[in-house]
Amino acid sequence: MKKTANTWKKNTDLSRLNALSENTIIALLGIEYTAIGIDFLQATMPVDNRTHQPHGLLHGGASVVLAETIGSVAANLMVEDDKVCVGLEVNANHIRPIKKGHVTGTATAVHIGYSTQIWQIEICNERQQLVCTSRLTVAVIDKPKH
């Protein structure tokens, strides 16, 4: 599968992205943007009491929040100021359990279209082993007028 080379349409930096997360589920789960490259966006999330399920493992839903967060932000960096991206579908395959530490998610574009985008998000543990693979599809819509 050929990946689309990104040309971010909006300028941003990690401090601005992290500031936008204040008072959201992103901050609640401890998600932090850590790298932005020409064709990817990356963030980390702790594996601790905030992100555990009752058996002490990383909750699959927390992985999905991480994946959708990174993919959605990346998608919105790819559209003009009069457009926004909203989620249509997200799926996740949970590959490997993890009890503690951090996971890092990396979003890369699979398809950047006029009305839809598809993003692949790979979530790995600190040993670079795949924990979860996810795919996010977003719709590109006109920015709502307030």
Image (cartoon, rainbow, N blue to C red):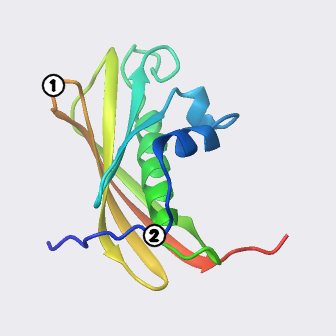
Q: What secondary structure is marked by label 1?
A: loop
Residue drawn at (49%, 48%) of the image:
69
Residue matched to label 2: 78
Q: Position of residue 119 (x, y in %)?
A: 35, 62
In the displayed structure, would residue 3 be above or below residue 52? below
| Tags 2 and 1 touching, CB below 8 Å | no
Q: Earlier in the sequence, mark 2 or mark 1?
A: 2
Q: Please tell me the numbered disc located at residue 33.
A: none
Residue drawn 26% across and 25% down? Answer: 97
Q: Which of pointers 2 and 1 indicates the residue nearer the eye?
A: 2
Relative to 75, say whether 82 is above or below.
below
Q: How many marks?
A: 2
Q: Residue at 41% of width from left, 47% of height from top?
A: 67
Q: What kind of residue is marked 2?
A: Met
As drawn, which residue projects farthest toward the right? 146
Name the residue beneath numbered marker 1. Answer: 127
Q: Is residue 83 left or right of residue 72?
A: right
Asked whether 49 or 31 is in front, the reply is 31
Above or below — where is 1 with respect to 123?
A: below
Mark 2 residue crowding within 10 angstroms, few (<14) / some (14–19) / many (20+):
many
